[in-house]
């Protein structure tokens, strides 16, 4: 008996696993088809459910982003409107700031739009009283009075509300709790005046006098003259061509002027802006897909179409050339790079100090310190006369035309409003001319 059991056990162990189940006659061996069908069905259902869930999540995120994009667009427009309000006040406030700066009172900035940062977090703290409380000021009484006043105004609106009036809605508008700042996201506005740039293209092609044309060209040349830009004019562009500094200035003018003749960019002050005899589109005949527009630039990005002007050029000195400025540099807001270009423009031809990098760096640093110290601190006033006196103290002989290149007013501004809600960011760029309460828009873009 034991031998029989041992024999069957050995036979069972030596039999492959797939053949250990005995075969039932007439029905064949079971293969687990039902289990396989269930597993496949479950897999398909899981795939379908996962796909539906992923699609719905994508739709949800798209809808959320569209909602946040609308909010960010509204916040960017609000930021722009606040900047417009600020710039509309500059003619009334800026003369006072200029006078304070001239008398020597040290200021963190010398222009109205630089003194007041437009940031939603800062404005929120200002309107809620948090900023004043941080500075040690007790504004609880003022906040309570404002709260009561707003409640009275709301009751008055409810009493006089007429739902039958066209466009009235179902109920009067109720401001959100918390006042200003009770919104999702943040915004800020950066204001840059075009008069802080050392060179401008505006009005260049409409000037009559060759001397005036030459003056425009010289200012652009002094912007691109520093030795650190040499590599830009030594490398070849995408078409395998090199463009010198003089040629680039000539191409800029040919893009603007109304004739078809190429300008002689190496002519002197008595012959500049006069045609050199060739066709201005000849420089674009070797692989370029554009020709001179013979009209004014519509947007800053259009500078890339001019032969010799690449993205590298614009990154290097594109922010120093304006297509909107009036022509005079505002020394109150001019950064160091603009002051450097002004020094090149004001100096006599061949002035040896311009080639002394140590002298140039010390002069630029000294002017910045002089602006911070003010007259009372032993510095020079941030005015055209003050800058000329400072350069004279540094041993530089300036030309009589130097004063005509500078001023203390700005009327053309680039306002960049940036708003973020959730993961969505909207940037609104606007270029406008503001003179008192009159506005004129030159450029508008949203991305």
Image: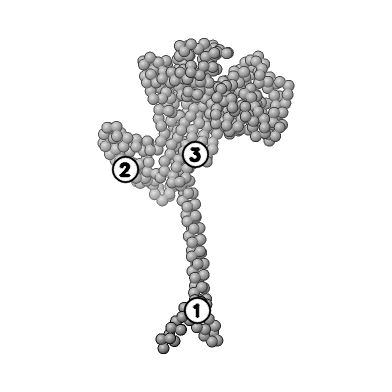
Q: Is residue 56 placed above or below 70 in the rendered structure?
A: below
Rendered location of residue 342, percent (x, y): 52, 19
Marks 3 and 2: in contact by CB < 8 Å? no
Mark earlier in primary sequence (2, 3): 2
Name the secondary structure under disc 3.
Answer: strand
Note whether 198 is above or below 178 in the view shown: above
> Which one is nearer the viewer's eye here, 377 or 212?
377
Instruction: Give the residue drawn at x 47%, y 54%.
Output: 60
Reading the image, the residue beneath label 1 is: 15
Badge 1: how crowded within 10 Å, few (<14), some, or many (20+)? Answer: few
The residue that mark 2 highlights is 151
Total marks placed: 3
Residue 276 percent across, percent down from the top left: 71, 20
Residue neighbourhood size for the residue with mark 3, other residues' Cα within 10 Å, grouped as few (<14), some (14–19), many (≥20):
many
- In this view, the residue farthest toward the bottom is 1
Which is nearer the eye, 231 or 72? 231
What residue do we see at 49% from left, 52% from top?
Answer: 62
Foreground residue among 3 and 302: 3
Residue sticking out furthest to the front: 3
Q: Position of residue 335 (x, y in %)?
A: 47, 24
Q: As drawn, is 133 to the left or to the right of 165?
A: left
Q: CA distance from mark 3 to mark 1?
A: 76 Å
Left-right relation of 236 to 61: right
Mark 3 — residue?
427
């Amino acid at each position: 008996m034991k031998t029989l059991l041992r024999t069957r056990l050995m036979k069972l162990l030596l039999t492959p696993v797939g053949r250990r189940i005995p075969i039932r006659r007439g029905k064949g061996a079971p293969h687990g088809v039902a289990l396989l069908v269930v597993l496949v069905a479950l897999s398909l259902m899981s795939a379908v459910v996962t796909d539906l869930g992923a699609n719905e999540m994508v739709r949800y995120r798209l809808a959320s982003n569209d909602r946040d994009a609308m909010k960010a667009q509204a916040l960017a427009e609000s930021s722009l409107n606040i900047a417009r309000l600020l710039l509309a006040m500059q003619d009334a406030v800026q003369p006072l700031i200029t006078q304070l700066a001239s008398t020597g009172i040290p200021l963190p900035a010398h222009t109205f739009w630089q003194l007041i940062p437009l940031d939603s977090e800062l404005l929120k703290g200002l309107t809620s009283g948090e900023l004043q409380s941080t500075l040690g000021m007790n504004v609880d009484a003022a906040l309570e009075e404002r709260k009561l006043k707003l409640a009275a105004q709301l009751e008055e609106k409810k009493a006089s509300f007429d739902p039958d009036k066209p466009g009235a809605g179902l109920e009067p508008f109720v401001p959100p709790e918390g006042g200003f700042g009770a919104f999702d996201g943040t915004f800020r506005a950066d204001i840059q005046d075009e008069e802080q740039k050392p060179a401008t293209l505006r009005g260049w092609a409409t000037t009559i006098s060759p001397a005036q044309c030459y003056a425009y060209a010289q200012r652009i040349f002094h912007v691109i003259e520093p030795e650190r830009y040499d590599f830009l004019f030594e490398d070849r562009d995408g078409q395998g061509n090199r463009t010198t500094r003089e040629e680039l200035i000539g191409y800029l003018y040919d893009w603007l002027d109304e004739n078809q003749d190429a300008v002689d960019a190496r002519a002197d002050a008595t012959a500049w802006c006069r045609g050199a005899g060739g066709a201005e589109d000849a420089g674009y005949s070797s692989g370029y897909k554009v020709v001179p527009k013979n009209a004014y630039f519509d947007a800053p990005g259009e500078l890339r179409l001019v032969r010799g002007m690449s993205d590298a050029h614009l990154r290097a000195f594109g922010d120093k050339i304006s297509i909107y400025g009036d022509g005079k540099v505002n020394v109150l807001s001019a950064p160091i790079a603009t002051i450097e270009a002004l020094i090149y423009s004001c100096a006599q031809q061949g002035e040896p100090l311009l080639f002394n990098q140590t002298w140039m760096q010390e002069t630029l640093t000294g002017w910045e310190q002089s602006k911070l110290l003010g007259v009372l601190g032993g510095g020079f006033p941030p005015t055209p006369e003050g800058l000329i006196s400072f350069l004279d103290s540094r041993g530089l002989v300036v030309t009589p035309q130097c004063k005509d290149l500078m001023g203390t007013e700005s009327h053309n501004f680039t306002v960049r409003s940036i708003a973020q809600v959730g993961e969505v960011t909207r940037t609104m760029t606007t270029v406008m001319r503001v003179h008192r309460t009159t506005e004129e828009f030159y450029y508008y873009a949203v991305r």
